[in-house]
Image (tube, grey):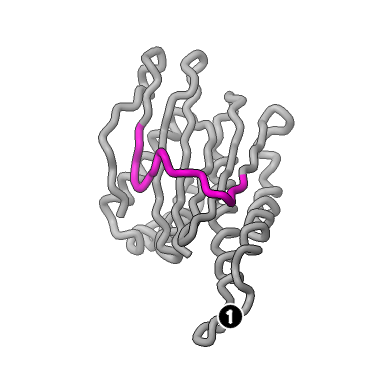
Amino acid sequence: MVNLTNQQFPVSNPGKTAMTQIFGDFIADIPTSEEYLIIGFSPSSMPLKQRWRNNGLSADFIADYFTTFFPGDPAPDKPISMKAEVKSAVSFIANELLENAMKFSDESSQYPVTIQLNLKSNNMVFWVTNSITPQQVEKLQAFIEDLTLNDPGDLFIRQLEKEPNQGESGLGLLTMVNDYQAKLGWKFETVQTEPLTIAVTTMVQLKI
């Protein structure tokens, strides 16, 4: 389950001073590793939603790049190599994060989507940042609250049983928790007040 912090976020008061709100296992000042990759997507050159088909390509590129740092031969007690396991995990997580970022980005904002992956000695850390409307802020924070109050496995089953057209299910995020034991965190911040621009950064920590 995800732990929440209590900080104010002025969604309904855009004229106020910009503030930040943190949820879950979000580390604000994590050091940058020697091995990292950042990819940015600007909505000014092409609408973000038109890049939908490129998400898988971008995710596979990130996975291919980082799996060069892992051994290719399987361990004696494991039929699958560490490289194959890491590649599959990175590709899935990166693709899910990019799809969410592109799908829910605020179309009225020219704020870019960025994805960053840092390689540590025993874990990987993903960051994806995109703009988001106040309405989407409320929906995402409601999902986060739901995640704190329910077992992730039970919540996954409940979300599967919903009608497909009911909107944001969060199944990708729940899969990260259930299948990869990932830690999730979010940071919401007002990056501009006139006009109001809200950015959300989703952090995923994956042990390797």
Residue 31 vertical placement versus 59 (above, below): above
Q: Is residue 161 above or below residue 25?
A: below
Is residue 114 shown left or right of residue 182? right
Which of the pair 98/107 is nearer the observer?
98
Residue shown at 44% from the left, 66% from the top:
179
Q: Is residue 40 left or right of residue 197?
A: right
Which of the two residues, 30 or 130, is positioned nearer the viewer here?
30
User: Where residue 47 sits: x, y (%)?
Assistant: 68, 33
Q: Which of the 4 image quadrants contains residue 38?
A: top right
Position of the N terminus, as image quadrant, is bottom left
The residue furthest bottom is 76
| Residue 35 located within the stretch drawn in magenta | yes
Residue at 28% in and 47% down: 3
**Residue at the right extreme of this rendering:** 45
Q: In this view, does 131 lie above or below 86?
A: above
* Residue drawn 28% across the image and 43% down it: 4
Q: Where is mark 1, residue-wise?
A: 74
- What is the span of residues highlighted in magenta in the rendered image? 21-37
Dot 1 alpha-carbon crowd within 10 angstroms: few under 14, some 14 to 19, many 20 or more: some
Point out residue 113 in the picture as x, y percentages from the top left corner.
59, 36
Q: Which quarter of the picture shows residue 154?
A: bottom left
Residue 64, image x, y percentages: 67, 60
* SS assignment at label 1: loop
Kind of residue at disc 1? Pro
Report the number of discs.
1
Please tell me which residue is depicted at 47% across the width and 35% down the height of the picture.
Answer: 200
Residue 61 drawn in magenta: no
Q: Looking at the image, which is closer to me, 177 or 20?
A: 20
Q: In this view, does 149 lie to the left or right of 83?
A: left
